[in-house]
Image (cartoon, rainbow, N blue to C red):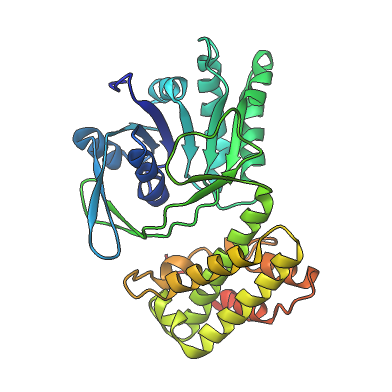
């Protein structure tokens, strides 16, 4: 595959904003050689030509990520070989693509099983869905031959809390992800097989479900609230919405209600939760991010699903005796939003 045998190998399914704008950066900082599997041949070809790509931060600084390479998803034999040789795998393809991905992963796992010491293997699932691990594991199980069903017990289907905001892809060869500097990646410590991989920023947390719900309701929920309420006011950027006095008051009320609800569960330390919440609100207000309302508001039907960031947050607040009014307003705003993308 053209890699040095002295370096650990990571293969990431998805060379988009999260794949290259976050995961590839973490692996590069941790001295891993990184490969990307994607459907976009122009991106894959550029990665193979350059063996590197750039990330741009809000202050304009660009940093290189290397060494990297790419493989097109339709190159099935090469993808299977990548799965066979990887020391770790990751996904950032979108939850709707996981059933299809499961089939090719199963082929790679069968091939991998032919060599000694091929397992355990961890698969970092960087999808914004509470049940992404169940969906992907089921897809793999359904695609595995009966003789290899036990392989799934040797694979860690590890959900991740992706909190780095990657705002856009700037023109380049390959395109340049523009991202914030936030660099923590909490992962499901109970799902890991073997030891925690040596990757900068990886943080094993338990119980993971609570951390995932906090991310979905506090981060994604407030982000969506700013987007849909901001769109009603004709605003362009998230920081404009956050710096609007009325919207700031709404978001802070919602954040404080969520804080009280989560602390009632007894699963978070109050000081840590408050610091996390304040950091998040500060990031939303940062004018250098230029995070567009249109980006955050896209696909409102998905974001209005039961249990997702808006309806799920409102229900969570009701269950813990807190006022969901701020989220109910955001739900109405989302239902009025017209997605033009």
Q: Is residue 62 above or below residue 339?
A: above
Q: Quadrant of the N terminus?
A: top left
- The C terminus: image quadrant: bottom left
Vertical comparison of 108 with 226: above or below: above
* Whether residue 94 is situated above or below residue 48 in the rendered picture: below
Of residue 128 and residue 6, the one placed in the foreground of this image is 6
Up/down of 116 relative to 210, above or below: above
| Front residue (pair 277, 95) | 277
Q: Position of residue 51 (x, y in %)?
A: 23, 35
**What is the residue that sits farthest to the front in this orientation?**
271
Please give left or right for residue 221 compared with residue 245 in the image.
right
Residue 107 placement, left or right of 143: left
Picture quarter containing residue 30?
top left
Tell me if I can see residue 331 in this picture.
Answer: no
Q: Of residues 68 and 229, which is closer to you in this image?
A: 68
Horizontal and vertical percent position of residue 221: 58, 68
Q: Position of residue 211 (x, y in %)?
A: 63, 55
């Amino acid at each position: 595959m053209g890699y040095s045998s002295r370096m650990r190998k990571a293969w990431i399914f998805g060379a988009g904003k999260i794949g290259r704008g976050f995961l590839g950066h973490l692996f590069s900082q941790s001295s891993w050689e990184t490969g990307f599997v994607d459907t976009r041949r122009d991106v894959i070809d550029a990665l193979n030509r350059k063996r590197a790509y750039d990330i741009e931060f809000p202050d304009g600084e660009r940093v290189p990520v290397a060494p990297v390479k790419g493989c097109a998803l339709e190159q099935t034999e090469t993808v299977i070989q990548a799965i066979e040789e990887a020391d770790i795998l990751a996904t950032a393809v979108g939850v709707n693509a996981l059933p299809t991905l499961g089939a090719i992963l199963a082929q790679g796992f069968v091939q991998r099983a032919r060599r000694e010491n091929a397992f355990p293997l961890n698969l970092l699932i960087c999808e914004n869905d509470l049940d992404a691990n169940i969906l992907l594991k089921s897809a793999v199980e359904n695609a595995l031959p009966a003789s290899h069903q036990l392989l799934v017990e040797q694979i860690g289907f590890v959900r991740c809390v992706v909190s780095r905001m990657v705002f856009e892809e700037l023109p380049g060869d390959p395109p340049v992800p523009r991202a914030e500097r936030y660099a923590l990646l909490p992962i499901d410590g109970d799902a890991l097989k073997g030891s925690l991989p040596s990757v900068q920023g990886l943080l094993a947390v338990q119980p993971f479900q609570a951390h995932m719900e906090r991310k979905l309701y506090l981060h994604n929920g407030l982000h969506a609230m700013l987007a849909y309420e901001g769109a009603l006011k004709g605003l362009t950027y998230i920081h404009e919405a956050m710096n609007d006095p009325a919207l700031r008051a709404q978001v802070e009320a919602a954040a404080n209600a969520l804080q009280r609800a989560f602390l009632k569960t007894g699963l978070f330390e109050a000081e840590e939760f408050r610091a996390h919440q304040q950091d998040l609100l500060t990031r939303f207000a940062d004018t250098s991010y230029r995070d567009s309302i249109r980006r955050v508001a896209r696909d409102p039907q998905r974001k209005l699903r039961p249990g997702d960031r808006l309806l799920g947050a409102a229900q969570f607040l009701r269950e813990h005796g807190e006022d969901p009014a701020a989220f109910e307003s955001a739900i109405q705003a989302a239902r009025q939003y017209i997605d033009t993308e």
